[in-house]
Amino acid sequence: VSTPIYGKLGDLYGRRALLTIAISVFVAASVLSALAGSMFQLIAARTLQGLGAGGLMTLAQAIIGEVVAPRERGKYQAYFASVFAASSVGGPIVGGLFVDYLSWRWVFWINLPLGLAALALCRYALRRLPVHRHRARIDFVGAALLTLCVGALMLVLAWGGNLFAWTSPAIFGLAGFSLAALALFAWWERKAPEPLFPLHLFANPVFRSAGGIIFFCAMAMMGSIAFLPLYLQLAAGASASSAGLLLIP
């Protein structure tokens, strides 16, 4: 939910400043996660960490579009893709080794040096990034409706078949609430003077195709990353480091 909000705020107040804030929130929340003394504290810190993480990929991609010439953007996208691929393979392995031989808290402590290095890059490498300040309205109503829609959908997916039966009134009610919030969001974005998510983008066939492909790729990848390690450890009896190794394929 925070991803499009960061994109809009970056348009208004400059992407370097917003990226600095996003990294700072992410690093601070990582420290709080590492220091958590209870599950409630860990969940709260992870919520804050998500508010920071929502801006990292969006703003980084937007900065490429702003400072790199079109003919060079493919090369920089390749840099991003190679780093992401290496992280996707190496991250679960390193994380599993931390859990097995140090402590799960090191999964969060490792973000501290990486985040400080990223902040230094923001300060010095992006010093000349232009800031286009202009008066504009922030679509708070659209942000609230999007939050309600996605939040209710997440509860349906988390509670369905677990706390409640899929056919229970609670699940049907949450699903209906999510659909209603989505309909209100679409209606509002059509009339908002400066929409959070301009719906006219869907008239572009390139946007529709790319968005659909990314949706299904991200769903498969993120779902695998989230649930395969749990399955391997809880059902197959693998250790955390073994589960990381088994994710390589």
Image (cartoon, rainbow, N blue to C red):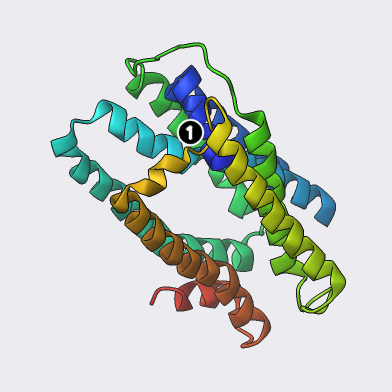
Q: Is residue 199 above or below residue 228?
A: above
* x, y percent for residue 237: 64, 86
Q: Is residue 155 left or right of residue 142?
A: right
Please say whether residue 246 is visible from this viewpoint. Answer: yes
Q: Is residue 102 above or below residue 190?
A: below
Residue type pointed to by label 1: Gly
Q: On the image, numbered disc 1 is attached to which residue?
A: 7
Q: How many marks?
A: 1
Between 239 and 227, the residue placed more toward the observer is: 227
Q: Is residue 227 left or right of residue 44?
A: left
Between 195 and 130, the residue placed more toward the observer is: 195
Q: Quadrant of residue 30?
A: top right
Q: Residue at x 36, y 47 (%)?
A: 203
Q: Is residue 209 above or below residue 75?
A: below
Placement of the N terminus among the 4 image quadrants = top right
Q: Which residue in the rendered view is the most extreme toward the bottom? A: 236
Q: Residue at x 66, y 86 (%)?
A: 235
Q: Quadrant of residue 174?
A: bottom right
Q: Is residue 3 left or right of residue 84?
A: right
Q: Residue at x 43, y 35 (%)?
A: 59
Placement of the C terminus among the 4 image quadrants = bottom left
* x, y percent for residue 104: 66, 59
Q: Residue at x 58, y 45 (%)?
A: 186
Q: Is residue 151 above or below residue 175?
A: above
* x, y percent for residue 25: 62, 33
> Could you say whether the residue bearing mark 1 is in a helix, strand or loop?
helix
* x, y percent for residue 231: 62, 80
Report crowding for label 1: few under 14, some 14 to 19, many 20 or more residues within 10 A (C-alpha). Answer: many
Between 211 and 205, the residue placed more toward the observer is: 205
Please say whether residue 30 is visible from this viewpoint. Answer: no
